[in-house]
Amino acid sequence: MISFDGAFYTIADPRFEMTIPAWEGYAPDTAREADATITFPDGSRRYATFMTLDVIQKLMDKDARTGESLGGRYFWCSDLIIIREAGFVGMAAAVRDLVESGEIVQACGLLDPVDDAREQ
């Protein structure tokens, strides 16, 4: 289930909750890239960046024009999960599969716990 509070989209799954900032021009069905915080029932959190292949291609083409990254000869992004199709549903499915396989630990960086006293 996807909910929206005006600033963030939240995808609820029994095994995790994924929070994605609401970037202008991005919608749950058409987003080709997103940054997400994945929170687990035990309170642990991980970070992921999602991109489709066409987004990566556009970034590399831009770098070829600007000379960055050896003229677009490489691209890197920490905690990257490449998805074939746009949309939050596919992003959540990838996280679900990574959780089920145990590979989420290698794929997505661990975030510090939320400090409730600092958040207030």
Image (cartoon, helix red, strand yellow):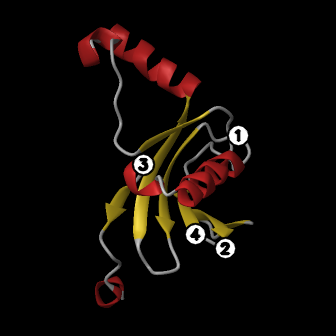
Label 1 vs label 2, nearer the camera: 2
Mark 3 sits on what residue?
Answer: 107
Q: CA distance from mark 3 to mark 4?
A: 15 Å
Q: Earlier in the sequence, mark 1 or mark 4?
A: 4
Residue 16 vertical placement versus 32 (above, below): below
Q: Quadrant of residue 120?
A: bottom left
Q: Earlier in the sequence, mark 3 or mark 4?
A: 4
- Please indicate whether residue 8 sits to the left or right of residue 66 in the image: right
Mark 2 is surrounded, within 10 Å at the Cα level, by few (under 14), some (14 to 19) or many (20 or more) other residues, namely few
Q: Earlier in the sequence, mark 1 or mark 2?
A: 2
Label 1 vs label 4, nearer the camera: 4
The amino acid beneath tag 4 is Phe
As drawn, the label of residue 14 is: 2
Residue 14 vertical placement versus 70 (above, below): below
Can residue 15 be spotted in the picture? Answer: yes
The amino acid beneath tag 3 is Ala
Mark 4 sits on what residue?
Answer: 16
Q: Earlier in the sequence, mark 3 or mark 1?
A: 1
As drawn, the label of residue 30 is: 1
95 and 76: which is toward the camera: 95
Q: Residue at x 33, y 76 (%)?
A: 113
Q: Residue at x 56, y 25 (%)?
A: 53
> Where does residue 99 sit, x and y in percent of width and height?
54, 59
Does the residue at mark 2 contact the one at mark 4 (Cβ under 8 Å)? no
The amino acid beneath tag 1 is Thr
